[in-house]
Amino acid sequence: MAKTILQKITCLLIFTLMASTTEAQFTRGVQMNFGKNRVQYNDFLWTFYRFKNFDTYFYLGGQELAVYTGRTADADIAEIEKLFDYRINGRFQFIIYNRLTDLKQTNIGLEGEEQNTNTGGLTRIVGNKILIYFDGDYRHFREQIRAGVAQVMINQLMYGGSIKDRLQASVLLNLPEWYVNGLIAYVAKGWTPEEDSRMRDAVLGKNYRNFDNLSGQAAEFAGMSLWNYIIETYGKTSVSNLLYMTRINRNIENGFIYVLGVPLKEIRKNWIQYYQNLYIEDDKNRKLPEGIPVYVLKKQNRYLSQVRVSPDGNQVAYVTNDLGKYKIWLYDVRTKKRKKIAKGGYKSVNQAMDLSYPTLAWHPSGRYLSAVKEKKGKLWLDYYTFGKK
């Protein structure tokens, strides 16, 4: 009896050692240049679950996320394979991080040839590895799963399976941001009421007069709405046909002509007209509210969050985030003046912005403001006291 228990314990220890790995093993075979490795403040001991079509890698605290991925990813993979009419070559590997700050410490795919195969977007792709993180929102977490799956499939479908094939194909086929990133965004999110409201503002504000000059998030959303128009007008089968003909002809224009029978220029015109007719008809019976309009000048890539009003209503605290670099502001309602009381972070165009930190809260007395910030992998609590600064 004792011998049997000892054998079971020994087998369990061997399995744990086989299932556990460090990030160094993920990056094995990827050449890292001196001075370009990210500073890591935390140690990650990785474990994985193996499913039918993919593996989920996680560390302490990420078991529930790995199980959630296992429950949902199979259905998402099957749905996207049906949409693209393409079956993935190889297995997916989901590298799951418990929070964004942990993902920012990773060296996986930081340097090496495979990073050049990324087509864009915030979900990091290294070969068949999909790097995702949890920010407290399971809907956003699943969107990252779907976006990663879609991006890997498009990479293989359009550029081939091996790195050599992708480098050769990328010379012959250069896909614009709106085409690839827009399709990935549509597959990840679908067409939600939030996107519909955003498109209403863009169309009625005539934001898409210079379609070819769009870049970044503007190009992604314009492409997303264009793919939604194509699917609503020509059906879902048009997506796989357009991808296939674009790959065969190495030309986007020819793909639209062969599949839809309409040149791309005409498609863009019909796309805008489609949304204009939709929204203008919907706004016929609506009236603007009385009062003076409030005009807000919004700078590109800058986000405002954590708006907190003091208990006496005289002060408003808020955070602005510019590509990862944040500032904490205080606005005096009586004097209509604002001042910066703290700043932190750093700008990065290649990483997602973490809008969950810093988190602000007023003391019930209103005499000081507290802020929870994230720095070097740890959480810090700071206070701002009026009069003492």
Image: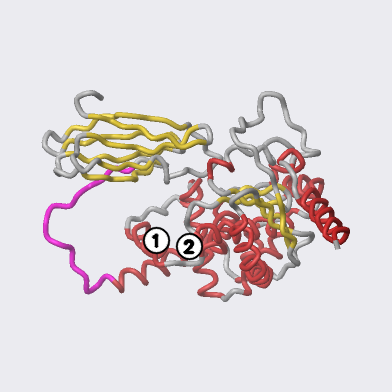
Q: Amino acid at mark 1?
A: Met
Quadrant showing the N terminus = bottom right
Q: Is residue 322 above or below residue 156?
A: above
> Cβ–Cβ below 8 Å for labels 2 and 1?
yes
Task: Give yes or no for residue 291 being in the magenta stretch.
Answer: yes
- Nearer the observer, 164 or 17: 17
Magenta-tinted stretch: 283-298
Per the image, the residue denoted by label 1 is 199
- Nearer the observer, 378 or 103: 378
Quadrant of residue 243 within the rendered picture? bottom right
Badge 1 element: helix
* Colour mode of the rendering: secondary structure
Per the image, the residue denoted by label 2 is 225
Question: Which residue corresponds to the image point at 59% horizontal and 74% vertical from the top-left?
Answer: 236
Badge 2 element: helix
- Nearer the observer, 69 or 182: 69
